[in-house]
Amino acid sequence: MTTADRLFAQRGATVPLNEIAREAGLGVGTVYRRFPDLQSLVDALFTERFTVFLHLATRSAEHEDPAEALRHYLLEAARMRAEDRALEVILANASVDAGPVARTRDHLGRLVDGLAERAVTAGAVRKDFAGADVYAFLYMIGAVADRTNDVAPDAWRRYAEFLMVGFGLERSPRERTSALTDEQLLDSWPKPLGERG
């Protein structure tokens, strides 16, 4: 599946299964026996990713301090998102409205909502904080990470810390991370189609 991840990150979820098999050094029949079509591969990758997020949410909820529980989930989920350049493509193309994928999505949603509600009840975050803010947080961090990964792989942490201050979770950032340099900012700037690597 790492070959599919790499190809999805580079080209989106339109890579044919035959090409994924060839790049992975596998026979086409081997791949088709496990994944009858591209959708089943995307859904399997989604379930694999969300199972990891489920475990993270469960572990985070074990923290006695609701603020620390939420902070742990936010930072670890952000790190996972920053390191997983295929995740956005997988999320956009998974069958999230039906079957096992929908059940996995809903289970994670309930756990994340629980982390958010517990933090609100404890006064650890602003009163209007909600589970949806966790997903928006990850979208924003993912956008920063995708743009800066090649020039400043840890840049996402600075913005994660700032957002947590905005949520009321922290009074000031715990991590003292540096802003991008002018050179890094220019290197991370969008490139014309013909110049993309």
Image (cartoon, rainbow, N blue to C red):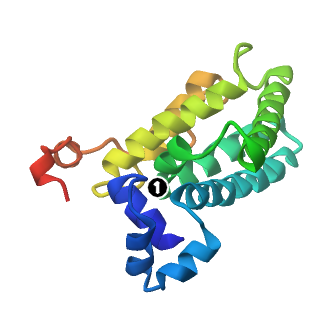
- Label 1 sits on a secondary structure element that is loop
Q: Determine whether, in the image, residue 125 is placed left or right of residue 43.
A: right
Query: For residue 24, what is the image quadrant?
Result: bottom left
Say which residue appears at 84% left-offset and 32% top-offset.
114
Position in image of residue 22 (x %, y %): 39, 80
Taking the image as drawn, is residue 170 in sight? no
Say which residue appears at 67% left-offset and 60% top-offset.
48
Position in image of residue 92 (x %, y %): 51, 41
Query: For residue 167, what is the image quadrant?
Result: top right
Taking the image as drawn, is residue 22 in sight? yes
Q: Quadrant of the C terminus?
A: bottom left
Instruction: Please give the residue where the numbered disc 1 appears in the rendered image.
Output: 86
Say which residue appears at 11% left-offset and 53% top-offset.
195
Q: Which is nearer the eye, 98 or 65?
A: 98
Q: Amino acid at mark 1?
A: Ala
Q: Determine whether, in the image, residue 50 is placed left or right of residue 183.
A: right
Position in image of residue 146 (x %, y %): 37, 48
Q: Determine whether, in the image, residue 16 is placed left or right of residue 84.
A: left
Q: Which is nearer the eye, 119 or 108?
A: 108
Position in image of residue 140 (x %, y %): 47, 34
Q: Determine whether, in the image, residue 189 is placed left or right of residue 160.
A: left
Say which residue appears at 58% left-offset and 27% top-offset.
165
Q: Which is nearer the eye, 69 or 192?
A: 192
Does 156 sit above or below residue 121? below
Q: Quadrant of the N terminus?
A: bottom right
